[in-house]
Image (tube, rainbow, N blue to C red):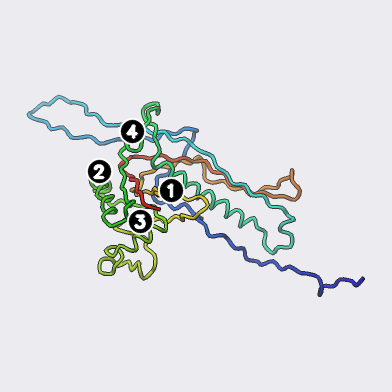
């Protein structure tokens, strides 16, 4: 039998580049939420309400105490992890060790989970009171709903802004406002001429093909076709949000911890693992609004 040579043996050359699937890689809500350190399994977020000044008449008035609301909210921590194994056999002959790419994928997964936990907590019940056993629904907490299922129009965005003004949100000082949208809502907003036309705006969104801000509201885009969509859809209705900066509080026990370890219980196997422990709670109902559209 003839001896095989390099000329008649299949040779596989590995690229030194790795394609990373299109995906959300960073938390898009971090700049708009408050973040703090959690030291226990349960954490109490404390806030105070407003108080009215009392008019004094005449002289030598007796001191009278006024009442101010103390708002305590329960935040429970949740633990998440991503662990990816790397078998030496699978990467034999490669020019690149995949540990770096695996680590980046783990971090991206955890950052997405952070946004998901925040969004899930936006309209969830909160536990309040001294012992944090009193249940308060989103509606009872002051969360309003803007129904745009008949069409996302400028009037609906103005309705949300009016709700903030009427509830004294961001009136005294400029406060960032942010809205979560999918491709459907992005297309609808691009179709509102009074927002995108050069006669009214200098963003030139139609020329760029993308819009970042509408009526002073920052727009955060989430993929409707992602493996786990951030904005839930039920019965053809997508539930999104418009919130002011600081409407959500995120407690983290520690920063994301990523490790690369040798697994001696498996042959030539290394694992890349990331662990995160965090939770989220709504700080004040009137700082956030539910915004519903048609999928």
Asked which quadrant contains residue 127, the reply is top left
Q: How far apart are marks 1 and 4 (CA)?
A: 32 Å
Place of residue 39 in the rendered image (x, y in percent of width and height, measured from the top left): 49, 35
Instruction: Tell which residue pokes out farthest to the bottom in this image.
Output: 7
Q: How far apart are marks 3 and 2 (CA)?
A: 20 Å
CB within 8 Å, label 1 to label 3: no
> Left of 182 or right of it: where is 170?
left
Disc 2 residue crowd, few under 14, some 14–19, many 20+, Cα 10 Å: few
Residue at the image point whose x is 20% and y is 35% from the top: 52
Q: Name the residue under label 1.
A: 233
Which one is closest to the eye, mark 1 or mark 4?
1
The quarter in which the N terminus is drawn is: bottom right
Indicate which disc, 1 or 3, sits on the residue closer to the N terminus. Answer: 3
In the rendered structure, the answer to whether residue 79 lies left or right of residue 72 reads right
**Label 1 – label 3 distance at C-alpha:** 22 Å
Determine whether the residue tagged by mark 1 lies in a helix, strand or loop.
strand
Task: Please rate how many residues cluster around mark 3, counting C-alpha atoms within 10 Å: few if below 14, some from 14 to 19, many from 20.
Answer: some
Using residue 213 as the reference point, say whether residue 258 is left or right of it: right
Residue under label 2, please give it. Answer: 167
First in sequence: mark 3 or mark 4? Answer: 4
Residue pictured at 78% horizontal, 69% vertical: 10
Residue at the far right in the pictured view: 1
Mark 2 → mark 4, Cα distance in angstroms: 17 Å
Q: Badges 1 and 4: C-beta atoms under 8 Å apart? A: no
Question: Tag 1: Cα neighbours inside 10 Å, few (<14), some, or many (≥20)?
Answer: some
Between disc 2 and disc 4, the foreground one is 2
Counting from the top left corner in percent of width and height, residue 19 is at: 59, 63
The x and y percentages for residue 283 are 36, 40
Residue beneath disc 3: 218
Q: Mark 4 points at which residue?
A: 71
Q: Within 10 angstroms of label 4, few (less than 14), some, or many (20 or more) residues?
A: some
């Amino acid at each position: 039998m003839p001896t095989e040579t390099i000329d008649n043996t299949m040779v596989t050359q590995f690229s030194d580049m790795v394609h990373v699937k299109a995906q959300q890689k960073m938390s898009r809500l971090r700049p708009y939420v408050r973040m703090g350190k959690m030291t226990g399994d349960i954490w109490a977020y404390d806030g105070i309400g407003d108080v009215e000044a009392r008019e004094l008449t005449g002289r030598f008035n007796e001191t009278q105490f006024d009442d101010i609301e103390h708002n305590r909210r329960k935040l429970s921590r949740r633990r998440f992890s991503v662990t990816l194994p790397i078998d030496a056999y699978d990467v034999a002959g490669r020019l690149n060790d995949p540990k770096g790419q695996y680590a980046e994928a783990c971090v991206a997964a955890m950052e997405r989970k952070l946004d998901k936990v925040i969004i899930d907590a936006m309209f969830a019940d909160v536990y309040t009171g001294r012992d944090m056993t009193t249940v308060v629904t989103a509606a009872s907490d002051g969360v309003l709903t803007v129904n745009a299922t008949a069409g996302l129009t400028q009037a609906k965005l103005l309705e949300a802004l009016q709700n903030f003004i009427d509830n004294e949100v961001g009136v005294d000082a400029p406060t960032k406002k942010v809205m979560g949208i999918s491709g459907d809502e992005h297309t609808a907003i691009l179709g509102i001429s009074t927002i995108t036309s050069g006669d009214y705006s200098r963003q030139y969104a139609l020329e760029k093909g993308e819009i970042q801000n509408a009526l002073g509201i920052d727009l955060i885009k989430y993929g409707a076709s992602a493996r786990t969509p951030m904005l839930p859809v039920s019965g053809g209705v997508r539930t999104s949000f418009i919130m002011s900066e600081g409407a959500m509080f995120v407690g983290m026990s520690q920063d994301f911890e990523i490790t690369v370890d040798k697994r001696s219980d498996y042959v030539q196997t290394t694992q890349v693992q990331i662990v995160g422990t965090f939770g989220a709670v709504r700080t004040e109902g009137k700082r956030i609004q539910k915004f519903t559209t048609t999928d």
